[in-house]
Image (cartoon, grey):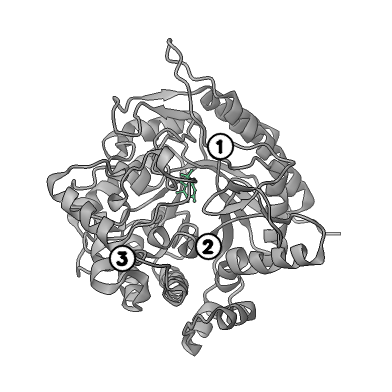
Amino acid sequence: MNQRKRRELLWGGATASSQYEGAWNVGGKGLDTQDCRPYVPRTEVATTATRLLTPSTIARAKADALTDSGNYPFRRGSRGYEHLEEDIALLKELGLDIYRFSISWARLFPNGDEAEPNPEGLAYYDRVFAAVKAAGMKTFLTLTHYAMPLHLVEAYGGWTDRTLIDLYVRYARVVFERWGDQIDYYLPFNEINAGYFSPWNGVGLPKPEDGPYDQSLVFTSLHHQFVASARVIQMQREVAPAAQSGCMVAYFCYYPFTCSPEDNLKCTLDENVNQWYAVDVLARGYHPEYMDRFWAEHGVPVDVLDEDRVLFAQNTCDFVSFSYYTSSVVTTQEGEQTAGNLVVTTRNPYLKSSEWGWQIDPVGLRDALNRTWDRCRKPVMVCECGFGARDLVEEDGSIHDAYRIAYLRDHFEQIEEAVADGVDCLGFILWGVIDIVSAGSCEMGKRYGCVYVDADDEGNGTYARSKKDSFAWYHDFIEDYHRRF
Ligand code: BGP
């Protein structure tokens, strides 16, 4: 019997421009959607779920931008813009095979709709690509990781307007024409399904001042992003055919709370709408029927054109990827709640939780890999995973993050199990390999990195980098893995 040869996994690390770069008004960059999110002390927010921006909070953020006042953590990030070469050298020393990073759309197109890109933005990313290449790492590019030029929100209504598709493809074309031969893997959008849990981050939609989101605007925007993804893949295959295209969702790993048929069915239906919808469109190439029923039942009119269906069918991505932090529990009954990535979920009594309530479930990662592989039969990349925790710096400067090492060790074991199950896994990317601002709660204190950044939630600190214990551990793991392979 013929067995598929196992591929050697890539071990990587990731950042995202809006959480890492800072320099929000340097080098001609335009104000973007993440630059508008103010810091809110944790005591004032119930969970880590993204705080919702409304027209009035956006107006305040714009006014504060004029005087550069207020506490807007994404405007500082980890000051990566200034620490670029030092940080890439650290990643090289860590021994990463691959580095995932994103380009800031507003650094290349400050307003998003200019005819030509900003030369200073191009020059900055020339440096980024050159540094990654010189460090011998593969590149994994996210074209959009949550942030978009604010002007596109104000002038077009964000992704509700189909015009955004052309503007986005124009931006992506500049990227592929300039750096296409240096891009190994890429994603058009980070966690594309975040659009309906966190519409500001995902699709640039402010929450109406009084009242809930209009779900037809949310899903229409999302559909436009799907069309944009397929159009980008179509264009990239002409301009830079060697790059591998992916799609990415936040993986929720749903479990039914009980074995009642109702809980089980809810699990399947929630999973379809919340998690598989994007994967079915982008990796399997069709608009799934369960969404038509969901929209009809919820009174959500969305226009899916015939030409969109043809585009999806002809431009499926090469690999599938997801972020995995925790699993989720669903039930038709009342249950104790806890926070997870993007969602509030029922607490799983079998699992321990982080300080932020995210439950730790390595076994769920094996399940996620198996189920994604079974559904798509395309290589699967764990493109985000890690443990957000508060780190303590000892007097001698050392940081003993044994909890992070334990989290990684347990999850790596499950990846190796999934590979033994037959999953064609491309690799694992450690989220926030250098400490960055939290996307959900805007905190600096929620850290994922092997590299510590000396900064607090208010932006105090030297921003100096230092290595945590997990740095040596991850380094040795990668070295040992490749030796064993
Ligand atoms: C994902 C995002 C990342 C990220 C991560 C951890 O949803 O793609 O940008 O930050 O979650 O979330 P948080 O920063 O809220 O802990």
* Residue 362 image offset from top left, x and y in percent: 69, 41
In which quarter of the view is residue 20 placed?
top left
Report the Cα–Cα distance between label 3 and label 2.
18 Å
User: Mark 2 against mark 1, which lies toward the viewer?
Assistant: 1
Tell me the amino acid under the disc marked 2. Cys
Judged from the image, the secondary structure of the residue bearing numbered disc 1 is loop
Q: Position of residue 49 (x, y in %)?
A: 47, 50
Q: Is residue 155 above or below residue 87?
A: below
Within 8 Å: ligand 1 and the Cβ of disc 3? no
Answer yes or no: is residue 75 visible: yes
Whole-percent x, y for residue 43 in the image = 43, 38
Q: Check disc 2 and report the residue beneath it.
A: 247
Residue count near mark 2 (Cα–Cα under 10 Å), binned few <14, some 14–19, many ≥20: many
Of the residues under marks 1 and 3, which one precedes in the sequence? 3
**Left or right: where does residue 323 sit relative to residue 258?**
left
- Contact, CB < 8 Å: mark 1 with mark 3? no
Q: Amino acid at mark 3?
A: Tyr
Q: Is residue 170 above or below residue 407?
A: below
